[in-house]
Image (tube, rainbow, N blue to C red):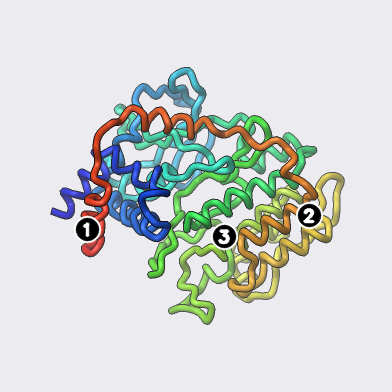
Amino acid sequence: MSFFFASYLIGRSSCFWKVLRESSTILTTGEQRRTLSTLCKLAKKASVFPRCYELKGIQYSPRLLDGGSFGDVYKGEYKNQVICVKAIRMFERSLRQPLVKHARELILWAFLSHQNILPFYGAYIDQNSQRLCFISPWMDNSNLCNYLETHPGSPRNILVFDIINGLNYLHEESIVHGDLKGKNVLISDDGRALIADFGISNITMSTRHTTSSKGTIRWCAPELFDPGEEDSEGCDGTPTRESDIWSFSCVCYEVFTRKVPFYQYHRDPVVMHVLMKGIEVPTRPASHGLDSVDDSMWDIMKKCWNYTPKERPACSELLQLILEHSKSPGSHQQAQTEDGQAYWKVQKAESNEDFNYQGACQILTRIQQGI
């Protein structure tokens, strides 16, 4: 019976997702967080995704433009709009495998709506290859690393402000990114930073859970590598808000120096060894033209690289510190990334089904006991 309700609620009922997208007056913050966490578990357990997010008529070029450990990136078109198609890699000809592995990413990403988060348009199933694809706006400026190579004179303080603003939004929603790095930050047409790639993100709950993914070594907080049973800071190896803060500072390092953290070490295992010994943070390089870190910003970054996780500043504090450092970044025009929000307004308007929010939440609560 639980599986039946899971499949129905996740796969068929588009109205249910209004509980999360329009829940500020329906659910408390705690209820919203628990509901989102439960939905992620249900989607993974039932190997389905919300069909209200499924898009039809996607066209994309077979030319591979980029790729990572989980998927390949193609350029496509949807309703006369240029889009990014992230096709999940498959090792068997079945949708179940990618749905089990990526249902959480789909649900979390669809839930998010912020000017510094890459908009999520929907999911597409390629009928020829049976690959699950995530659809988002196409960014001509590519990711942060590529952008700074071609636009070294861009205002870097604004990029840093955008990233911490987006990360602060995630943390306020009780979501940990888990793999923040320059390649997971895209740049909009007007030069603003958008956080992307939520493949190993999680919802922070009062009870811990484990994950085999820790992020990318050079951007990882040291406590994620060898937590043992559970260290003195209470870390069990799961990415946390505090580990996101460490990674954020590593992204700042990329922004201001155009180098990867620990660039002096060519092998990742060496970086891991250095971090596990607890003796080193990324080296401050000598200033070189536009690539420099002033004393004030370096002090902020070092606060984030504290080896004691609880001693690192929270996003809200960093927002204020970076605002002060940047003088007045708020005077610059904010990125206009409302296309994703506008899309979902249309999607919501297309559905006028009546839905029993309270009843659905009661069902989810009962199902959660069996997960």
- The local secondary structure at tag 1 comes to helix
Q: CA distance from mark 3 to mark 1?
A: 31 Å
Please identify, in this view, whether the residue under mark 3 or under mark 1 is nearer the observer: 1
In the image: residue 296, left or right of residue 129: right
Instruction: Please state if 133 lies on the left or on the right of 173 as rendered.
Output: left
Answer whether labels 1 and 2 touch (C-beta < 8 Å): no
Q: Of 212 and 104, which appears nearest the observer?
A: 104
Residue 329 % position (x, y): 74, 45
- Name the one closer to the observer, 146 or 328: 328
Callout 3: few (<14), some (14-19), or many (20+) C-alpha neighbours within 10 Å?
Answer: many
The residue depicted at 69 percent of the width and 53 percent of the height is: 252
| In the image: residue 267, left or right of residue 13 | right
Q: Quadrant of the C terminus?
A: bottom left
Counting from the top left corner in percent of width and height, residue 352 is at 28, 31
151 up-or-down from 205: above or below: above
Residue that lies at the very extreme toward the top in this rendered image = 80
Viewer can see residue 218: no
Instruction: Measure the alpha-carbon separation of dots 1 and 2.
Output: 48 Å
Give SS at disc 3.
Answer: helix
Residue receiving disc 3 = 244
**Which of pointers 1 and 2 lies earlier in the amino acid sequence?**
2
Query: Mark 2: which amino acid?
Result: His
